[in-house]
Amino acid sequence: MTPAHANAPRPSFWRALVLSLAVAALNFALWAALNRPTEPPGWTGKIGGLAYAPYQRYQNPNRLIYPGTEEIDADLKRLSRYTDHIRIYTALENPVVPAIAKKYGLKVAAGAYLDHRLQHNDDEIAALIETVRANDNVNRAIVGNETLLRNDMGVDALIGYIDRVRAQVKVPVSTAEPWHIWLKYPQLARHVDFITVHLLPYWEGYPRKDAIGLYVLMRYYQLQSAFPGKRIVIGEVGWPSSGDRIKGATASVADEALFIRQWLNVAAERHLDYYLMEAFDQPWKEPFEGRVGAYWGLFGADREPKFALAGSVVEDPNWPWKAAISGLLALLPMFWFARHFMRFKAQGLFFYCALLQLSASLLVWSATLPFAFYLDPVDWAMLLILAPAQLAIVLILLINGFEFTEVLWRKRWLREFHPLPPLPPEQQPFVSVHLACCNEPPEMVILTLDSLAALDYEHFEVLVIDNNTKRPEIWQPVEEHCRRLGPRFRFFHLDPWPGFKAGALNFGLKETDARAEIVAVIDADYAVRPDWLRALAGHFADPKVAVVQCPQAHRDWEHNAFRRMTNWEYDGFFRIGMHHRNERNAIIQHGTMTMVRRGALESTGGWSEWTICEDAELGLRLMHAGYDTIYVDEIMGRGLTPADYTAYKSQRYRWAFGAMQILKARWHWLTERGPLSAGQRFHFLTGWFSGSPTRCIWPSPCSRSAGPPA
């Protein structure tokens, strides 16, 4: 009889579940911390005044798209619950505003918008005069709005318009400008009944906490001192809920709420006359005022309040459900990871689960963020185009994070290989070392050949295959040196010869000694250790092993900054990435310091001449055929790094191009269930993302192109 506890979940199940829930809870706590409520002073009275532009979400006066009477009526009815005074900016557009405002008991500061168009200005002035005369709830007239700031006309011309209006209406008349314009043109004050000043500390880069005391009040009293006895009305004062940072000024919903609620209390205490900038968000302003231009409203363009005037303020009131969705989105991946990789140290499990959770939160935040802005169809189209790129970036982050997690926080390697004790000479398999070269400096190739001649191994040969080198003075010294080194060194000059490096190696395969069981390949710039073959050949005693690979390492990089950096990059891949791949029998075969079982190489088709990454393609093909690959992290030879950025860029191009060739030709292997394991498919599909050194350096121009896949 089966015990009751036999089907109970293993302890790893519960540990994985607890860890996943703990990280999800921390995620919720982080969202809460970032949206911690603030408690600015509350306000329950009416607002002194509101600047009002009646345009709805998709309306735009520059495109002659205006609100209807019903929309204006609804706006003013709403605003009458918050204030008794509004300010409008133009007399020609939406002329029904003052009459509807009277219906709701609102006093109106009517404006005339002046610019460089003379006929337009005359029409605005006439319409303003008519508006004031026809509506007894118009208690002020403001002739021009920042006209001098924009340099649309001179001060004398503006004074002429002001004087014309003052002569024909019975309400106080002014013009609206920032504080420094009033100080620059003090004569302007003599022609107005009151000074209308715009005080917007955000544009001056003041931090929100200092904006009222160090800017608004200071400038207000500065004007009061400059123009004693003149009434001062603050025509615009406010803070945006979104926009770019300007020095110390940041735009956010919380900042706007804190500024406005503090201002309402300060203005009431000091009996200041003002109009908040502004009643409703105006998305149509964004093209010429920048992103911030759309976000000055107390209400959004949807006519809903952005925040309350009493109680706590939260930057994102919707954060709880965003946190919950991101937690649920990450929960299953976290649980799966923790359950399958419980062999990692606790720090590694926590780190990667946290990375999964942060990635989910980032995606949720990114998906919801656009709804906080007034985007047009073009913006949405661009977002949809960029969304896959952002998803790819997150996936790359997770792929690289998994690599670092496994390397840094493993308890042990599941597959770890080292140099083996040397086999007795009579048990050593015969090795055929292939060195393909093209237009390489002869002295460099000779150094490589001398290192091969010093190998402490009994049974080997060296085949030097020079393909398509045209100048005899380059290849003949190498041929002569092979002759001096003895019969185990054979030289072949091929001209012309197709297939680039893979073609040369396939030629060498046909010329290989019949006794050879192993084919070893190195680049023409490598100097090898004497024990290279002796320490590694023993791994082929296992008939499943087809590839034994050593790191691609370098020399002579210490005294050149560029070469130092490239060497560090290569070293990172071979110290981290290859171990990571080796865990799942998915190493990249790169075309130097590699040893291949000859029978496996020949039975699977030799070197592929249709790709310039013939080495990586061979490794994938051997895995697909069911063979094992081994990575031994022991430097057995050193070559040269790319000499300069041009060579480095050319190398990277070859890797990327070759990778695409392999993906195109072997896509069905990588996406369908078959001989390749899930781990092998994962590494070959994702391993190209970061541009890792996944193939040998083959710097000669003879190998930089290849024909199409067969």
Image: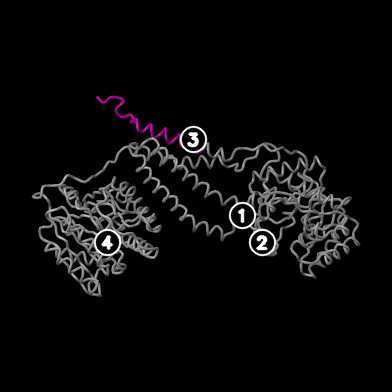
Q: Sequence order check: which comes first, mark 2 or mark 4?
A: 2
Residue 288 has which mark?
2
Q: Which quadrant holds the N terminus?
A: top left
Q: Which residues are magenta?
A: 1-27
Residue 118 has which mark?
none
Mark closer to the observer (1, 3)? 3
Q: Sequence order check: which comes first, mark 4 or mark 3?
A: 3
Mark closer to the observer (2, 1)? 2
Q: What residue is shown with label 4?
A: 525
Mark closer to the observer (2, 4)? 4
Mark closer to the observer (4, 3)? 4
Q: Amino acid at mark 3?
A: Ala
Q: Does dot 3 land on a helix, a strand or a loop?
A: helix
Q: Main secondary structure of the magenta part?
A: helix
Circle 2 Cα neighbour tier, 10 Å, few/some/many (<14 / 14–19 / ≥20):
few
Residue 374 has which mark?
1
Is 174 magenta? The answer is no
Q: Does dot 1 land on a helix, a strand or a loop?
A: loop
The image position of residue 496, as x and y in percent, is 22, 74
- Front residue of 4/657: it is 657
